[in-house]
Amino acid sequence: MTEAILLVGGKGTRLRPLTVHTPKPMIPAAGVPFLTHLLARARAAGVEHIVLATSYLAEVFEPHFGDGSELGLHLEYVTEDEPLGTGGAIRNVASRLRSGPDEPVLIFNGDILTGLDIEALVSTHGSSGADVSLHLTRVEDPRAFGLVPTDSTGRVTAFLEKPQTPEEIVTDQINAGAYVFRRSVIDTIPAGRPVSVERETFPGLLASGAHLQGMVDSTYWLDLGTPQAFVRGSADLVLGRAPSPAVPGRCGDRLVLPTASVASDAKLTGGTVVGDGAVVGEGARIDGSAVLAGAVIGAGAVISDSLIGAGARIGDRTVLSGAVVGDGATVGADNELQDGVRVWCGASIPDAAIRFSSDR
Ligand code: GTP
């Protein structure tokens, strides 16, 4: 039985203010903490023992997931004294692993939403005899990513930094954030200091002649590291485009949790989720957005591609597009907030304070 390590200790700086009080894997996507989807997908692939490598806001994970038995899992938690980076975090949990030296251990970044065939990654690892196997995905524009070219057998030939010129774009394959390590390889990562698995461990293994195998799986893949990506991922879970056994309801245009209250003439579309205890007023229109628990949306508000934090309040007729409103913030009536705006947790915007000119 394969076991897994989940890396969930990052600070999630790109997702602020959502990550000010909540670590990235605990932000709700499609009505449940994002991590629930990852755990459920791992369980569905036959994983039973998972070690969570925690650091930033480490204390919130165990009270929520406990020993994991509700999900049919056995969960353990290991917290770093100081953040150890991705490789250091993997090494730091080694003592909790039960696998023998040659057995495979799965490792997942805690912020990737993907339809990856986890069992296929493990079996590719076994049949290729690799030391480490990596899920690779293809992207249209590889400029923002480190590249991972492979030979005709799928063996990794290099780890390249973000390409600066067109000539440096030698492949469209990138590291997708899921790996299988031979257990004994984990023990070779230096202990007690920060290590980046992407920048140090993988290039070092390659240079020492280790066998790193890439498996290109081009199913759904999204890095939820930014607010726009997080909102997109939540909507795709609701729509059923991104597969997860943990969506709390039937997939479709909208997901309204049982204790939410939505006015009968409000329109929810594009994978919008309305969380527990949230209220949506008359005539509001919400598209492709996530309204977290206890948030209140005023009458006639028009919201698209936005994330409304827990307990936040959006005034009547306010228009939000591509915006993030932090937990407990208030946006008064008749405002208009556009692409990329982030309202900090607990902040308060008065009525009719922010508008874009009507001749745009
Ligand atoms: P940004 O600050 O927005 O870049 O996000 P991040 O801190 O999550 O970093 P990144 O997206 O590069 O992290 C990839 C994965 O590794 C995520 O699942 C993080 O939770 C995890 N991670 C990053 N650094 C650490 C660390 O020091 N310790 C642990 N345990 N996990 C980490």
Image (tube, helix red, strand yellow):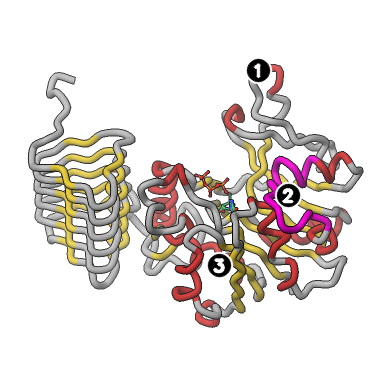
Sequence-wise, the earlier of marks 2 and 3 is: 3
- Residue hosting label 3: 39
Q: Nearer the viewer, residue 322 or 346?
A: 346
Q: In which quarter of the view is residue 350 placed?
A: top left
Q: In which quarter of the view is residue 141 placed?
A: top right
Magenta run includes residue 279: no
Indicate yes or no: mark 3 CB to ligand 1 under 8 Å: no
Q: Is residue 121 something that shows in the picture?
A: no
From mark 2 to mark 1, how far is it between C-alphas?
Answer: 25 Å
What residue is drawn where x is 39% and y is 69%?
248
Range drawn in magenta: 188-203
What residue is drawn where x is 22% and y is 36%?
337
Give, as a three-letter code, the residue at label 2.
Leu
- Residue hosting label 1: 166
Vertical arrangement, residue 193 with respect to residue 95, above or below: above
Q: Is residue 14 something that shows in the picture?
A: yes
Dot 3 lies on which element? Answer: helix
From mark 2 to mark 3, how far is it between C-alphas?
Answer: 19 Å
Locate residue 358, reporting x and y percent.
12, 24
Dot 2 lies on which element? Answer: strand
From mark 1 to mark 3, how far is it between C-alphas?
Answer: 38 Å
Query: How busy is the neighbourhood of tag 3: few (under 14 within 10 Å), some, or many (20 plus)?
Result: many
- Residue hosting label 2: 134
Vertical arrangement, residue 249 with respect to residue 140, above or below: below
